[in-house]
Amino acid sequence: MNAWPCHRFAAAALLVAALPCAAQLTTDPAYVAGRDAWQQRQWGGAIDALRPLVDPDDRGNYEVDYWLGTSLCRTDGRLGQGANILDWSLRFRNMPEAARPTLDGERRLCVQQLQAGTAPGAAPPVLIALAGGTATVKGTPKLFAVGGSDGLLANAPLRVTRPIKAAELEARLIPLGEPERALAMVRQLAPASRHHVSRRTVIASASPTHTAASLKLIGERLDDFIDFLVESYRLKPPPTYVAVYLYPDIPTLRQAAMRLHGMEANAMTLGYTFGNDRSILGMLTGTGAGTLLHELFHTVVHESFGGIPQWLDEGVASLYETATAAEGLYFGEPNWRSRVYADLVAGPGSGIRLADLVTAPWFSDEPAIHRKLGERVYDDAQQAYLLAFARMFALYLQETGTLHKVFDAYRQRTVPDTYVPAQQRAIQLLEQALGKPVDRIESEFRAWAPRAYDPATRFYAGNNRAQLIRKELPQRPATEIRRELPLPNADIAREPARQ
């Protein structure tokens, strides 16, 4: 689950993922200069300061998009760029729901003025989400609560009930190369734990089964995976230690969520990522790090690709929940989401096409806002299907050797001078990357998909140096799992648990 609070408030997204505020710090000179110029209605100064946060690496957040987009929309000859930035942010960047109507209003105004050829408008309003200061904001996560290797989708909001100032959270960011400071930080925040620092992570585990040796193994695995992401996806590594807090059960994790982040976690929460202090909280008693690999992808990708669409963010992150690791490389394998996809494709998933997947906005537990903005509303079963669809499509792209090509197409997208609706642009990027129309891409994907329906299928396991990495999940009664699956009576095949 991604719980990426944005400075003075918080919101959350998906299990083992976050509300991506990217790596943006409130003390970043470009952020401060751009905000100040925008507040003073110095549109040119705001553009000059903020543009480097978006291009060539997207290190911004929805605030940066709003300030930059509205500044461009008030500058002659640049309204098309402004409309494109606002539209992409609205459709594909995760943000508190309270901010979306204000951003949408500015997008509409910019498009109208562009089409009418009228002069730029008056000063834009302050984002509604910012006006509340430190007021409590409810998050909008969807939580995959699982038993064994079965999966279900359930609403599990994270709520900030004790807001923590951004400066306090950012003080927890310890630069790499200062291991003693990193250890001191987690010892202070999690004293009743066993601690370990690796090259890129600092771990505090309250799980009694974790020994110094097992924490060392976990740390080495996380370091290795970050190295893989940096090399394979050409991402920027986190410049500070990623703090990983591990717990033996959900009640202990929930207590830690309140203590560390002032968040009230649902009783089904298995883990989440918190953006402002680059931390991961998760339930783990062994050394199977699949959940942590999922979270680490979110953490690393938002260092240089904050505007990643939900399907690509969740699809690639979940790809590594079940993966074969060999010689520094990681390859996604079929898992329980394959069966979720297979079981839902003819039910709640019928009528949902690939174009719907790549244009879907971030899920919300406030459907009224989706309707107000003219967006399609997906129920829980459809959301379960979309997330399983995202992983299956990422697996297909991996197996056809095109995953990185598609990823780069979205990440390296340019901002057109003329207005192109974000949803249209999202489909164009996929078509250009694969060199074929979206309907043909979908037809070829669906013809391939049955190869991955069986969650026990392994494409890469088999040699002596390969190691299967899986989520570690709590065991739950099969009857309870069947009762809560997205489809009543859905029969998800169980796969033997492995460490």
Image (cartoon, grey):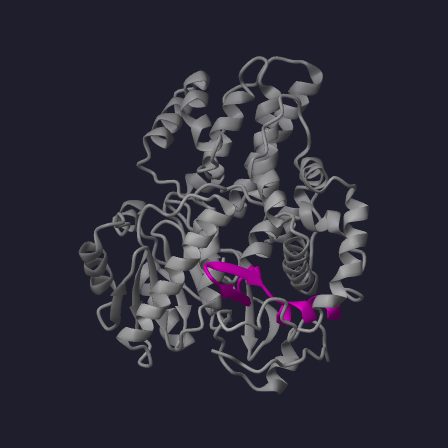
Q: In the image, 4: left or right of 203?
A: right
x then y, percent, for residue 76: 57, 13
Q: Position of residue 124 (x, y in %)?
A: 51, 26
Q: Picture coordinates of residue 136 (x, y %)?
A: 41, 53
* Residue at 43% over, 44% down: 303
Q: Number of labelled discs?
A: 0
Would you say residue 157 is visible in this rendering? yes
Residue at x 57% of width, y 83% of height: 496
Name the image quarter holding residue 373: top right
- From the top left corner, tell me how far across and down residue 365 is, in percent: 59, 57
**In the picture shown, does residue 481 fall above or below 37?**
below
Tell me which segment is drawn in magenta. Answer: 318-343
> Nearest the camera: 145 or 498?
498
Residue 160 visible in rendering = no
Q: Is residue 446 magenta?
A: no
| Picture layout, residue 40 above or below residue 217 | above
Residue 334 lies in the magenta-colored region: yes
Front residue of 280 and 348: 280
Residue, far front:
464
